[in-house]
Amino acid sequence: MARNVHGMVEKRGAGLWLTHVAMIAGVLVIFFPIWLAFVASTVTQAEIIRPPMPLWPGDQFAENYRNALVSGINVPVATMLLNSLVMAIGIAAGKIAISLLSAFAIVYFRFPARSLFFWLIFLTLMLPVEVRIVPTYEVVAGFGMLNSYSGLILPLIASATATFLFRQFFLTIPDELAEAARVDGAGPMRFFRDIVLPMSRTNIAALFVILFIYGWNQYLWPLLITTDPGMNTIVMGIKQMFPSGDDFAHWPTIMATSILAMIPPVIVVVSMQRLFVRGLVDSEK
Amino acid sequence: MDKRVTFKGWALPLLLIAPQAAISAVFFFYPAGQAVWQSLFIPDPFGLSSQFVGLENFTYLLGDPYYRAAFATTAVFSGLVTLCSMVPALFLAVMADRLVKGAGTYRTLLIWPYAVAPAVAGVLWLFMFNTRVGVVSWYLGQLGYDWNHVLNQGEAMGLVVIASSWGRISYNFLFFFAALQAVPKSVIEAAAIDGARFWRRFFTIVLPLLSPTTFFLLVVNVVYSFFETFGVIHTITGGGPQQATTILVYKVFSDGFVGQDLGSSSAQSVILLLVVGALTVLQFKFLEKRVHY
């Protein structure tokens, strides 16, 4: 009987094939834009501006990517990649560092205005940077942080998602551990370093994956504060490669840059899939 | 919710919380306060002084046909993006869930576009539909359809909706797939014994069980389409043609930075803030409910 029911629920034969066909069709449709970008990054400009462009890669791969990385259009793409890397790692590491500390303080201490701090941090959850761009821009300009890494990174660290995640996690750490540490005469920072940090390793890694992608994919903020092409990040720099007039955009270079802009986050997501899915589900809870 | 065992002292915790408090104060609370403050003023044309006008910026905005149009555009846009990113994701997740073998491989393949920045997704779709070199627009032309999102408002909207939904399908797929895997097999098998066919089982049993996930994704996708799609719109249409794709966030940007109308832009920020606040409350209401599941 049980086997029979299984047969009804899990598809076999024709139904199974149809399911695979549907999945493969879905994957192909989803992949098509990326495939096309890759093809465009391996052919010549002449092949693209005489439509239809080929749908199979050409022989200009090395040439186009070398050209993009070394000279680019306004600035070498290698420079933009470096800026993006600094920004993404800065945001991820910075947010994790300040959140670990403040969550530890909120969970393991009773101090004046503790709940006030808690609610103030909670409020920052509600307002994405897009909403307060003009005044935030003025603050950053006032500090002379336009076209600087700190200007790119600091305003995007001011959000509380990570603090909440760590708080939730710290609350699940058994009280006995803190008790034991106290009995042993270990101070709070010792407890933090020897017990809390090692226990949070997986959470830290999962959050790092999510925040790295968040930082890497930022667009509006770098667009506003990096007027110097040498400080452009790759995601916002692509748009700057389009000519302002009626000229043809140089598509092979632009598409090579688009592919380069995707590679780091895609590697992070695919290689750390488990952590990534976990981080995603956790951070949205 | 509180720990029984805590450490003594208050200087250390204040020191620990100081970095986050300082950054939030400087880059969050001060600018947010400034937005509210500036929304009550109109600067003179030379930017030398401002005049207090109370709620005039707001009343002006609410009566401004362009602002109302941006509201309507945002509603249409986020409705379409939510629909176009959730329905295909649910379909793919249901298909993947039927597979005993290979589901993991498909998941790995489908996860990709999530990593692609909205602005980069915008460039990819712009390339496919470019009026002069785009492959898709060229083939559409061969079929006798003249694609031109630069002039046609409906086509512009369609393109930014597809480009914004594309990467989101991955995200929604992950959540639907996880939720489907958590549906108890015994319930499905019981329905199968009763003779319910696959799609009937899906609509009467599985879909209701997915409702917490579906509702959560609805809210998250609406928030996404409100804010994170800025990159898509900026790269593909720049809000045009004739403001047909100017959503609220885009208008805050274009009025504040391009038009230099600080009072109006700040008032718009405050209105958006209220909208996000309402959405957040909705999300938390739902979270409370989910706890009882």
Image (cartoon, rainbow, N blue to C red):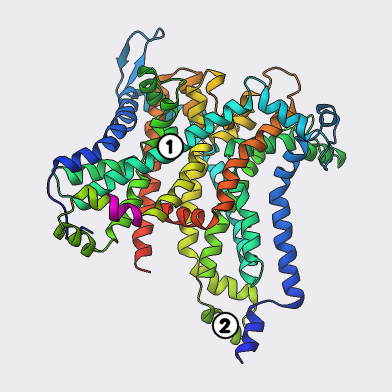
Q: Going 63% across and 23% down the picture, which residue do you hit?
A: A76
Q: Return the residue at label 1.
A: A91
The local secondary structure at tag 1 comes to helix
Q: Main secondary structure of the magenta part?
A: helix
Q: Quadrant of the C terminus of chain A?
A: bottom left
Residue stretch rendered in magenta on the structure: A193-199
Q: Going 63% across and 55% down the picture, which residue do you hit?
A: B110
Q: Count the numbered circles shown.
A: 2
The local secondary structure at tag 2 comes to helix
Point out the residue furthest to the front here: A184
Percent x, y of residue B86: 58, 55
Between tags 2 and 1, which lies in front?
1
- Drawn side of residue B247 relative to residue A133, left or right: right
Report in which chain the residue with disc 1 lies.
A
Was residue A200 drawn as part of the magenta stretch in this picture? no
Q: Quadrant of the N terminus of chain A?
A: bottom right
Closer to the camera, A192 or B225?
A: A192
The 10 Å Cα crowd at callout 1, few under 14, some 14 to 19, many 20 or more, is many
